[in-house]
Image (tube, helix red, strand yellow):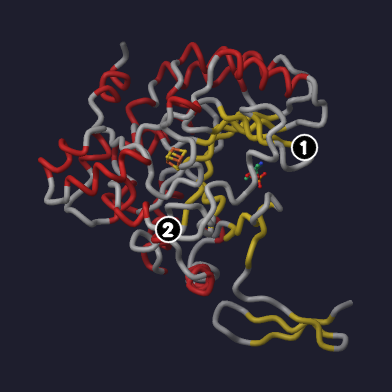
Amino acid sequence: METWQKNLKAAIIDPGELAALFPCDRESLSMVADRYPLRISPYYLSLIQEAGDPIWRQCVPDIRELREDGLHPDPLAEEYLSPVPCIIHRYPDRVVFLATTSCAVYCRFCMRKRKVGCSSTDVDREALEAAIRYVEETPAVRDVILSGGDPLLLSDDQLEYLLQRLRKIPHVEIIRIGTRVPVTLPERITSKLCRMLKFYHPLFINTHFNHPREVTPQSSLACSRLADAGIPLGNQTVLLKGVNDDPETMKSLMQRLLAIRVRPYYIHQMDLVKGTGHFRVEVKRGLEIMRGLRGYTSGLANPYYVIDAPGGKGKIPLLPDSACFQGDLLVMRNYLGETIEYPLS
Ligand SMILES: *Cc1c(COP(=O)(O)O)cnc(C)c1O
Ligand code: SF4
């Protein structure tokens, strides 16, 4: 067994263990964890400085998850857009491939909390083969996004099998992996893993940092190793109340990501997912945060702020400073709030 696998085995899954370490209510922890599983890797646990801090909020069950919030378990209609159980096919040329339902930490705000961590929805061999077959038989698919759960919780052999099968498909041009492992279980990014991944280029990885405190020597090393293997790294952040919903925190996160060679790709407005309502930030606030980035720091530190439209209608980017047409002029606003007129032709 590799070190990361041993460490994963030592993860906290029992509310009692957590209650022994921090002042919190064991009863309500258990109630929530019975519905939405608890798992915190030893490394991620070590980042918690005190109960209620931004790391804690992301991983410790909160009684508000059980509140009747009027939200839907699957607002993006992923199940409806699923031709076979492990594939979500929403856009013409790319699919999401759900390779597992396990993660190193179960994020409380997860948009797939309806299924992550549940053994009843785990991916078996048959489902995996059916998903590969779907990609093989669908020539329009040129981009496969491995997701889950966390695909990097598969063993090196399982992952290589999947990559090999996908690489053999002539119409699959690029493969992407969406993973939070560099943030939650950085020791999983071994030199051996990176040597293997190199064989399957063009391969892209999008990781998922939400707070500047997640950028540590360990997560930096994980990202370095991946970047050194020639893998372009992007980051998808979720805008979370009490975690990163202010301009300074977000700017610092974006800047720190660039310093470890990770290019900010998306900031996601929280999806309207049942059990996550207490993390929602107003769209107006989201736009204010974006306003704090544009012009004030590197363009590379400016991701798209997107809303994933309900009903599987797709991701829609929002811009804070927009332009409007006036006669034969385009009237624009810059980052300082100044108005600039520009000829239309
Ligand atoms: C986000 C997403 C994608 C990928 O979108 P990009 O904008 O290409 O990164 C593909 N399919 C589904 C279902 C998605 O939710
Ligand atoms: S790592 Fe991703 S899939 Fe897993 S619980 Fe967190 S947000 Fe959900």
Residue 199 appears at what percent x and percent y?
58, 17
Pick the quarter of the image with the C terminus.
bottom right
Q: Tell me if 246 is positioned left or right of 55 in this view.
A: right
* x 45%, y 66%: residue: 281
Q: Residue at x 63, y 38 (%)?
A: 79
Q: Which residue is mark 1?
A: 93
Q: CA distance from mark 1 to mark 2?
A: 37 Å
Residue 161: quadrant of the picture: top right
| Quadrant of res 336 | bottom right
Quadrant in which the N terminus is drawn: top left
Residue 14 lies, with reference to residue 267, above or below; the image says above
Residue 235, given in percent of the width and then of the height, sits at 50, 46
Q: Which residue is mark 2?
A: 68
Nearer to the camera, 256 or 41: 41
Residue 289 shown left or right of residue 77 in the figure: left
Seen at 51% across and 48% down, the residue is 236
Residue 122: percent from the left, percent from the top? 49, 24
Task: Specify the amino acid type for callout 2.
Answer: Glu
- 207 or 14: which is nearer to us? 14
State the image coordinates of residue 207 (x, y, percent, origin top left): 48, 40
Closer to viewer: mark 1 or mark 2: 2
Q: Secondary structure at mark 1?
A: loop
Is residue 288 positioned above or below 157 on the image? below
Q: Tell which circle, 1 or 2, labels the residue nearer the N-terminal end.
A: 2
The image quadrant where one finds ligand 2 is top left
In this orientation, which residue lies closer to the viewer: 147 or 236? 147
Residue with the most extreme front position = 68
Q: Amino acid at mark 1?
A: Asp
Q: How many marks?
A: 2
Left or right of 145 on screen, residue 326: right
Q: Secondary structure at mark 2?
A: loop
Disc 2 crowd rating (10 Å Cα; few below 14, some 14-19, many 20+) is few
